[in-house]
Amino acid sequence: MEGLLKFIHFTGFYNVTPGHLIMILVGLFFIFIAIKKDYEPLLLVPIGFGILIGNIPFLENVGLQLGIYEDGSVMNYLYFGVLKGIYPPLIFLGIGAMTDFSALLSNPKLVLLGAAAQVGIFITLLGALALGFNGQEAGAIGIIGGADGPTAIFIASKLAPHLIGAIAIAAYSYMALVPVIQPPIMRLLTTKEERLIHMKPSRVVSKVEKIVFPIFAFMITAFISPGSIPLLGMLFFGNLLKESGVTDRLGNTARTSLVDIVTILLGVTVGASTQATTFLTPQSMLIFLLGAFSFMVATASGVLFAKFMNLFLKGDNKINPLIGAAGVSAVPDSARVVQNIGVKADSSNYLLMHAMGPNVAGVIGSAVAAGILLAVLLG
């Protein structure tokens, strides 16, 4: 009987709390929308299942070494890559090996839209400070507005490791909800006439330009923001592997096997870090609200800045303001949203390639902003 009672005390049924049940429902919801709605399934399925792993109740601090926060547990070792910022640069390597910067190179002024969208980061930082977060916590929360999950995790690992779980879940949640959050803002801030603007075809970018770009872009951004070196160094290195024409094997590995493995490890461990006993706090709820605000401000900033640029552009040089929404770094989802809204306004208006310009610029912009925050808040 004593052994039976001991077994019962170790079961999840005995140790379950309302918090565990809430988080299990959240994990199931993530898996549901990933499969049913096709919202970022490569991210939300691992994160959703990770939430289930992290919220099966167990008796803590008895030497079982099960929880992600218990030293010596397998999940704790896997989580090391998140805590030390190892996984995000590897993700950036894969992104670089997938990315074609032609749209940006053919119309360099679109980089301004990627920069404009980063306004959401700094406005949210001020909002977080006003709500009582310290400077480093506010910086880590603000980066959610860049809609770049790996960058958010990288910054949180440096500035506020205790908030990684909430920041990562918020960042990836809003990345997945790009098709839901962005369209109302885009329609609200643009007129029908603006949505009908046709942009002139992009020029053909030479092979030499594609090879030279990652080298010089890295050097310029790294000199401006040395804190961004781990992210942008891997991003542009991955792109050079893709464009050089002599490292196809390395480029293919970076954009397929490597990025898939790291995405699995990152998603599952980030999900498991939402253990109810440490995750469900008023602070986490505030981070979710601030993340949504940051993302909406970033979207609006990109659209409004595109409208501002049009004041100085004439004829077929004008920009369709919708592509400003792609200035956030949710590649390529925000560019797809721009395409969908543009086609609904005019079935012959194809904006996808134009939107990819500010979209990839947003990836660079969020990493530069992250480096600036590190310099200011840790310097």
Image: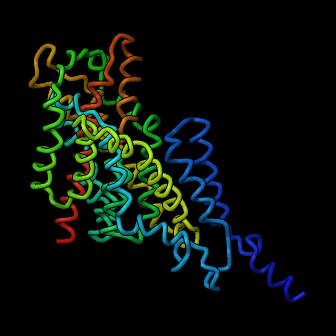
Residue nearest the observer in this picture, 291 or 252? 252
Identify the image quadrant of residue 224. bottom left
Residue nearest the observer in this picture, 108 or 282? 108
Residue lying at 35% horizontally and 56% vertically, measured from the top left: 88
**Farthest residue in the right direction?**
1
Q: Quadrant of the C terminus?
A: bottom left
**Farthest residue in the bottom direction?**
2
Q: Quadrant of the N terminus?
A: bottom right
Residue lying at 10% horizontally and 48% vertically, measured from the top left: 220
**Farthest residue in the top direction?**
348
In the image, taking residue 314 as reference, residue 244 lies left or right, namely right
Residue lying at 21% horizontally and 61% vertically, measured from the top left: 373
Look at the image and tell me whether residue 327 can be seen: no
Residue 350 % position (x, y): 33, 17
Residue 303 % position (x, y): 26, 33
Question: Vertically, is 37 above or below 11?
Answer: above
Question: Vertically, is 357 above or below 294?
Answer: above
Identify the image quadrant of residue 301. top left
Question: Vertically, is 258 above or below 97?
Answer: below
Colour setting? rainbow
Question: Vertically, is 98 above or below 257?
Answer: above
Look at the image and tell me whether residue 371 can be seen: yes
Residue 210 % position (x, y): 18, 33
Query: So how many labels did they put on this image?
Result: 0
Residue 270 % position (x, y): 49, 60
Identify the image quadrant of residue 53. bottom right
In the image, taking residue 143 as reference, residue 268 lies left or right, namely right
